[in-house]
Amino acid sequence: MDKQKNFPKNFLWGASTAAHQVEGGNYNNWTVWELENAHELAKTAKHKLGQLPVWEDIKDQAQDPDNYVSGKAVEHYLRFKEDFDLLKSLNLNAFRFSIEWSRIEPREGDWDPEALRHYHECIDELKKRGIEPLLNIWHLTLPVWFADKGGFEKTKNLKHWQRFVNKIADEYGSEINHVITINEPNVYMTYSYMVGEFPPQKTSLVSSIRVYLNLIRAHKLAYKILKVANPKLQIGLAPQLANIQAKRPHNFFDEVATKTVRYLWNWFFLRRVRKQMDFVGINYYFTDYYKGFVWGKGNQIVRDDQERYLKILPGMKRFNASVPLSDLGVYMEPEGLYPILLRVWARYQKPIIITENGVADARDQYRQWWLEQSIIAMERALSEGVDVRGYFHWSLLDNFEWAYGWWPKFGLVEVDRANGMKRTIRPSALWFAGKIKKLKDIDQAR
């Protein structure tokens, strides 16, 4: 039997979502920010997005302020049972979802019993279908009251985070096996406090460092609380890890730049919490190339963001990546997952779960290829002894893509928001379901 196809028994084949991006009806710092900025985002869309390969397809939506308001989202909060049935039909045995802090604690110290019950029901319904829940405690959004206090920028505010995590542990700690504390702390720090694209739109190096250090403290606090509640609970976090490479291998300047950025983006946070994680989550989307002080980012950063980065990183210039490009202008290199898996395993020697991995592809041209290449990357890593325990595709459903709004389509399942939130499984998802079945059949034959 081909060694590369030996996925572990009980491998987690799943899909991911985030509460704010799919639930609908939320009230948090993002919903406030959306309403304040929707018209400006629409007004500047052509300047920011006009170079994208899909601009002609998306321009009407991207220049509509309604695109930037999450609103009802895709009504996953109401339709979760229907969506869990879709998971089951796609042969998926795991689902990653986040708790919306602003739902369960809409006012400081005031818990909403209905919201708490809802997430209990989600866990119960997943288990009824034989689907393993992977609970994510925090995914970028903050209760308005917490944001008004300064959020994670102030160390004293960690007492509110501690109370929140204690509640999560008390409510759900005995019902689950896997939990992620924090999603993409590096992205949150960078886009909210360094380049100023996400709320609160600060551009302060001091604030960025302060937030990052407090998120490290927040993870350690959460790990301790959750382990007391359930010592058997497997706890990790999910940074976004880029496949950062030298443009010219073995060139001294390229290698120095590459190693520096790898450490700052990929390893700085993980190194400081390595004793407080039972598995390493990986969110992988793109490859970055460095040529000395010239930076070729797989993600074609929109013009305004380029200017922000260049102010922070003087002397760095951007060069264009090659095709193929996703709808978001991201250079697609799914096989870049393989070296990331090797590096994470070499550094931490802990189980790895790929907690997000996907592509913006409204026409469903590339998603099957992306999935196939990602599976091959995992097979290669497994054959070399890397302990990969699961793969969660981003996303189950088309979702609200933060400052881009509704036009990027990441879902295995298409959602037609203009026609009653109709769900339609994409052809790539049907292929994925068939591939999972074949891999499970191989597993059972062993």
Image (cartoon, rainbow, N blue to C red):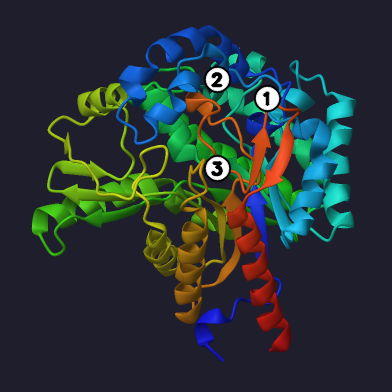
Question: Label 1: which residue?
Answer: 418
Classify mark 3: residues with Cα within 10 Å, few (<14), some (14-19) or many (20+).
Answer: many
Which quadrant of the view contains residue 58?
A: top left
Task: Give the amino acid type for the residue marked by disc 2 in the picture.
Answer: Asn
Does residue 318 appear to the left or right of 77 in the view shown? left
Which residue ends up furthest to the bottom in the rendered image? 1
Screen quadrant of the N terminus: bottom right
- Helix, strand or loop under label 3: loop
Marks 3/2: CA distance?
Answer: 16 Å
- With respect to residue 176, does 54 lie above or below? above
Question: Label 2: which residue?
Answer: 67
Q: Are marks 1 and 3 in contact (CB under 8 Å)?
A: no
The residue nearer to you, when weighing 105 against 433, is 433
The residue nearer to you, when weighing 298 against 361, is 361
Question: Label 3: which residue?
Answer: 410
The residue at the point 52 percent across, 12 percent down is 65
Does residue 254 appear to the left or right of 201 in the view shown? left
Residue 333 x/y as whole percent: 37, 56
The residue nearer to you, when weighing 411 against 233, is 411
Task: Give the amino acid type for the residue marked by disc 1 in the picture.
Answer: Ala
Classify mark 1: residues with Cα within 10 Å, few (<14), some (14-19) or many (20+).
Answer: few
Screen quadrant of the C terminus: bottom right
- Helix, strand or loop under label 1: loop
Which residue ends up furthest to the left in the rendered image? 252
Residue 344 x/y as whole percent: 43, 62
- With respect to residue 219, does 348 lie above or below? below
The residue nearer to you, when weighing 22 against 246, is 22
